[in-house]
Amino acid sequence: MKVSFPYMGTTVVYKKLLEMLGHEVIMPPKPTQKTINLGVKYSPEFACFPLKVIMGSYFEAIDKGAEVIITSGGHGPCRAGFYERVHRSILEAEGHFVDFIVFDSMFRDRKTFIKNVKRLKGKTPLHKVAHALWTVYDMIGKLDKLEIEVQRIRAHEVNRGETTRIWEHIQKMFDKAYTRGALRNAYNKGRKMLAAIELNPVEEENRIRIGIVGEIYVVMEDSINMKMEQLLNSLGAEVERSQYLSQWVTYNMLPKWINWSHEKHVLKLSDPYLPIQIGGHAKQSVGQIVDYSLRGFDGVVHLMPFGCLPELVSQSIIPKITEDFGIPVLTISLDEQSGIANNQTRVEAFIDLVKNKHKERLNQADKNINKSTQQVSAIG
Ligand code: SF4
């Protein structure tokens, strides 16, 4: 089968799994302005931004020869569950009759999940399927570990752009690795390459840490979020995303009794503010902001597609979390109309504010120490 999928984050992972199952993979191009224009042209105007970008990606993949599209589903009161229907009918109206395979959590609809796996598996023997799944799961975990390091050290690199160049090279190394041994080599080599990057020295207490939360597609896909991680890093802030692929897979695909994902903890933290699931990743966004506050992060950037109902709800809860925990949060709404310069200025101003708050905190801590020292000497 000539298969394709929506472009989102480290796509090398999806490509690897499908190749190992014996499919011809049609790589969707990384979304560009052309992709967005295509998606906007054919999608309903009121649709959320990810639907439009993915729509554009499908047209581009079909142009390259894709016959089957593999995607994730959705549930709850948000539009994700309708993506496949909407995309399919728009494509058919334009004369493209491709097939869709939609994956959702195996615990929601086991029958459909197994049916999908059987379709994807084709004639590949079961032991090879197990090997492919295990290899790719291993690969996702390793790539995420390296990416977390990238998001930290890029804030302090001496030669601007070096970390991103090396990160792209590392992903290419993983793309060529098909065995656990080759993956291990790629991982070890990647770690060494990252460790060799020259960094400006920074005291532990002077590190600025920013979390990124929000709707999964705009959080994970940097081509449509103004390369937010790189932007924050270039302003001297270390970054951590609320969503990583390994986390998503662990939470959605593993049985509860071996599911150690951090997401379970995050969802619990959101309960006092948002006790029910309202679709998308709104509950996770709320819980993550609390989690970042508890972990001492300096601020949070909240990304939401314009018109995304779940994230609109989480946006309305954020002032209460800021009041309770004192953490500054900047919400940025993204769509095809987003003004890059305007948003960049907002992010720069936000980081200035965060840095000032950080300094104030350090000064206050120093003052407290001096005061205690004076009191101790007075008693002595
Ligand atoms: S979470 Fe928001 S952007 Fe994503 S499908 Fe639902 S409504 Fe649309």
Image (cartoon, grey):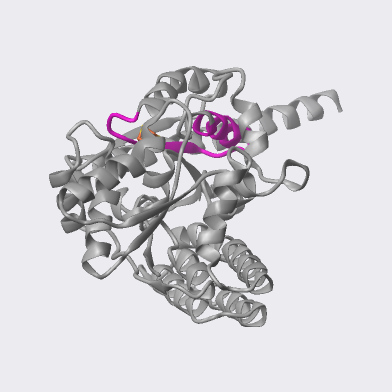
Quarter containing the N terminus? bottom left
- Residue 274 placed where, x, y %? 54, 20
Where on the picture, by quarter, is residue 59?
A: bottom left
The range drawn in magenta is: 284-308
- Residue 314 placed where, x, y %? 44, 25
Question: In front: 26, or 345?
Answer: 26
Q: Where 39 sits versus 19, above or below?
A: above
Residue 300 counted in the magenta span: yes
Residue 213 counted in the magenta span: no
Where on the picture, by quarter, is residue 275?
A: top right
Judge left or right: residue 116 versus residue 303: right
Query: In the rendered image, is residue 367 in sight?
Result: no
Question: In front: 153, or 276?
Answer: 276
Question: In front: 12, or 223?
Answer: 12
- Residue 135 placed where, x, y %? 63, 70
Q: Which residue occupies 24% across, 70% down?
A: 64
